[in-house]
Image (cartoon, helix red, strand yellow):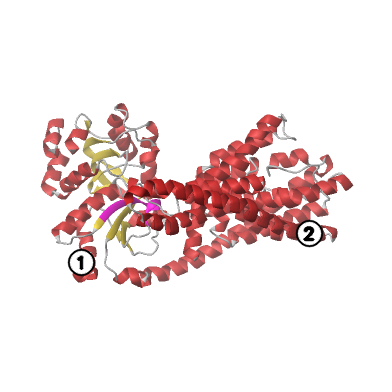
Amino acid sequence: MRKALHKIFKLYSHVIINFNGIFIFVGVLAVVFGDYGWFPNKDIYAISQFVYQCVIPILIAYALGNCMQGARDGKESERLRFGGAIAVMATAGMVMAERGSGIFGAMFLGPCCSLLWERLILPLLERVKSGMEMLLRNVVVALTGAVLAVFSFYILAPALSAIVGVVFIGTDYLINHNLVFLLNILIEPAKVFFLNNVINHGIMVPLGLQQVNEHGSSILFLLESNPGPGLGVLLALYLMKVKKRKQYASSMFTQFVGGVHEVYFPEVLSNPWLIAALMGGGVTGTLCFSLMRAAALAPVSPGSILTMMMVTERDSFFAVLLGVVLSAGVSLILGLLILRWREDGNAEREGVAVIDHPKQESIEKQSSPVRKVGIICDGGVGSSAMGAALFRRKLKEMNVIGIEVNAYAGDQVPSELDMGICQKDFRKMTGFELEGAPLYEVESLMNQAEYEPMIEEIKKRNGENI
Amino acid sequence: MIIETVKNRIRIKDKVSSWEEAIREAAQPLLEDGCIHESYIDAMIENVIQNGPYMVLIPGFALPHARPEMGVEKTGISCLKLNESVLFPENMEVKVVMALAAGDANTHIDALTELTDLLMDDDRMEEFFNSQTESEILGILK
């Protein structure tokens, strides 16, 4: 379960990073042409919102629906492409029911549809005679999509709204009792599950607008949209994880200036302790806002520092800025502490894992015959392809037959592999690990002597099964 | 097989100033033939930085490459032979650099299998490292 979740979070991060350009596009258009932007323009703003609420959810649904199982060679990907199609249809139901919840819908429905396709529909289809398969497949895909779209429209979206309704009442209570800052303890974790829009547009904005009617401004607009905590966490990651610096730097820009917070959610999901850093930063910021009576005149959307400045009352300008800076600072410090602490923990655990490495692999895979061997490198086309060629040659020399050897890119290794081989530095530098099968390291992919003991082991494991 | 793709894409140089230059120089024929875009060359260099010099397959021989989506138009292999070896990261000496542009995982498998056989053949590799002319290299690859 943990492994599966980890894999999904990695996919999230992969998908979000790929669409970073689109997120920047949305953020910049919304900041510049939004209602309170420099050049308010309803039409251009509408484009950005269309992309944000419809296009991005659909893209994410397609990508996630397809990539639960990574595979490179043509045949596999042909088979896998339909999980994405189903996810798109299911997400469409969500988008039409509740615009703000599209991304959350896609994040949830994408992997679900992929699993559904992989585990249920595909195996069923494979039992059908091959002539019928094509025709049947399209019909099944369409029908499944239709059922799921209706399901998300009438059940999933309303269920989400119902939950939001309950939270709405709770929020109202906290506001009436001057405990607004406690809200961040709820907001920050909910945000990283891609519920940011649901919170902002379903809870904060309606309640905030009510306050605007009564008092002329509201602090509520500043809670979810405060880019400080996210910036702090990204900064902490930037400082601690040197290898991914470029990515974090661009994420910081998208988040802080573009106001698109989604870029840091996957990072936090794959290291959930960071939620504490977000909470700390959020609470600090909101405390600062409420103590200094900062408030905004209108919803801050997107949650960019620029939008924030544009819609705050002139006399709370400084208070807002201070609140953002403080929350970023607190999140940064907490984030650094957490990352340091987790790193120590991980190092210790990895230390143990390395020692009894072969033993800790799943016993089933350890003793069952080896049928599929994967040589893994970054691209799956060059050195690993040659490694695979050499391995095949070596198998032949040693009279071992019935084994499929293929080259794979690190992120496209199929799950049914029995044995993986990669180069030592590649594993060290990329932190690559294999799930459910032993991973062997070699000094060089072209050193045939290193393959010999592995083939000996295959012989032993396959025994008379050869 | 391999000879067909490497033919007319062989360069021989006395020396280069860095491993980066070696990769750029080796990939030049592929760029000229429209097999790759400029971005692919950067990707190969970045690949060595990010993932370590695992492309130095055996001492003296490097096969720089990157993912197809980094800018490959069509499959091709080119060759740079240096008379004086260049140092790759972690002090790996390299005299032959073959830049690989793979359009997908399958089309070039035969060429790579052939190359694997060559790499395992110490005598032929010795000849390769000492070769001075294009025709000599073509003779070894045949």
Which residues are drawn in magenta? A405-414
Instruction: Using the rendered view, name the quadrant where residue B2 is placed.
Output: top left
Q: Along the line of sight, which residue is nearer the eye, A406 or A382?
A: A406
For marks 1 and 2 on the same chain, the one whose residue lies earlier in the sequence: 2
Question: Residue A228's x, y, as percent?
Answer: 67, 50
Please rate how many residues cluster around mark 1, counting C-alpha atoms within 10 Å: few if below 14, some from 14 to 19, many from 20: some
Residue A235 magenta-highlighted? no
What label sits on residue B18 in the rendered view?
Answer: none
What label sits on residue A456 in the rendered view?
Answer: 1
In this picture, residue A342 sits left or right of residue A48: left
Helix, strand or loop status at disc 1: helix
Question: Residue A463's x, y, as percent?
Answer: 20, 70
In this picture, residue B3 sits left or right of residue B29: left
Residue named by callout 2: A169
| Residue at (74, 40) in percent of width and height | A309
| Residue at (32, 40) in percent of width and height | B19
In this picture, residue A14 sits left or right of residue B137: right
- The residue type indicated by label 1 comes to Glu
Q: Nearer the viewer, mark 1 or mark 2?
A: 2
Residues marked 1 and 2 touching at CB (< 8 Å):
no
